[in-house]
Image (tube, rainbow, N blue to C red):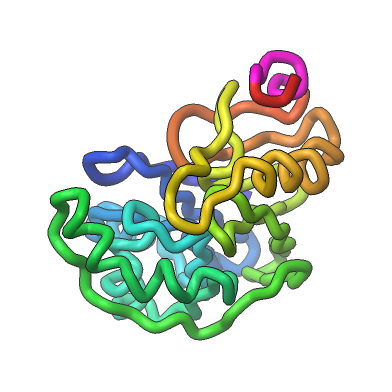
């Protein structure tokens, strides 16, 4: 089960392309920018993208969704509590001085607890609000795609609209720290880590 990591855009948001060896189907998690790079990986590996999965609706995680969806016809998934964030992406980019992306529609709203299938792979949707109201993580076996919830020795910010430090810490403890220590964490920014490492060294979780 290959995982391709691309750090995209000026904020170097991690986009993940995960693929099933048996079927060549793939899912793209958080296509934040530079759609041409994402599509090049897809083409070079002869992949068929069936799903675009959004951990949340902040602009740096979604600016390439429209282009990737147009090129692949993939189904876009996001949590229903991210509707406001997704509706305000153009305002978010304007506020931070970035060009507005092309608009897109979410095809399937999530509530948490669902399983999204990509070929023979399954990704469980974990509710992890706090960085944003509808923030989610995607768990695939021993791999966790944590968006802006959990980072290497850090956690997501909670001072943006709809954020809550209390919710964020509660979600991390309830949903993530109960996972096996060997679980690999693939965050929205920065390098990968493990649950064991974060339990021991993350100052926000002590």
Q: Is residue 135 left or right of residue 41?
A: right
Residue 202 on the magenta span: yes
Relative to 201, say whether 143 is above or below. Answer: below
The C terminus: image quadrant: top right
Residue at (70% x, 39% y) in the render: 169
Q: Residue at x 34, y 55 (%)?
A: 32
Residue 47, image x, y percentages? 45, 65
Residue nearest the observer in this picture, 49 or 54: 54
| Residue 8 screen position, x and y as percent | 30, 45
* Residues drawn in magenta: 197-203
Seen from the viewer's position, the closer of residues 31 and 39 is 31
Q: Residue placed farthest to the top in the image? A: 201
Residue in view at x 69 percent, y 23 percent: 198
Dominant SS of magenta comes to helix
Q: Position of residue 64 (x, y in %)?
A: 29, 63
Which residue is found at the position 57% from the left and 61% from the top? 133
Q: Is residue 131 above or below residue 49?
A: above
């Amino acid at each position: 089960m290959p995982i391709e990591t691309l750090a995209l855009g000026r904020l170097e948001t991690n986009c993940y392309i995960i693929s099933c060896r048996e079927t060549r189907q793939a899912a793209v998690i958080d296509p934040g920018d530079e759609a041409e790079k994402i599509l090049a990986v897809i083409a070079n590996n002869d992949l068929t993208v069936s799903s675009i999965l959004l951990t949340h609706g902040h602009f740096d995680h979604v600016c390439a969704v429209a282009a990737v969806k147009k090129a692949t016809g993939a189904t876009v998934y996001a949590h229903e509590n991210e509707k406001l964030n997704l509706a305000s992406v153009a305002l978010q980019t304007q506020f931070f001085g970035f060009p507005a992306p092309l608009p897109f529609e979410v095809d399937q709203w999530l509530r948490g607890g669902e399983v999204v299938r990509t070929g023979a792979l399954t990704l469980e949707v974990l509710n992890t609000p706090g960085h944003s109201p509808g923030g989610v993580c995607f768990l695939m076996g021993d791999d966790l795609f944590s968006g802006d919830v959990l980072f290497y020795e850090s956690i997501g910010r909670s001072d943006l609209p709809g954020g809550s430090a209390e919710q964020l810490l509660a979600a991390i403890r309830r949903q993530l720290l109960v996972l096996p220590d060997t679980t690999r964490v693939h965050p929205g920014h920065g390098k990968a880590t493990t649950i064991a490492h974060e339990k021991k060294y993350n100052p926000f979780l002590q």
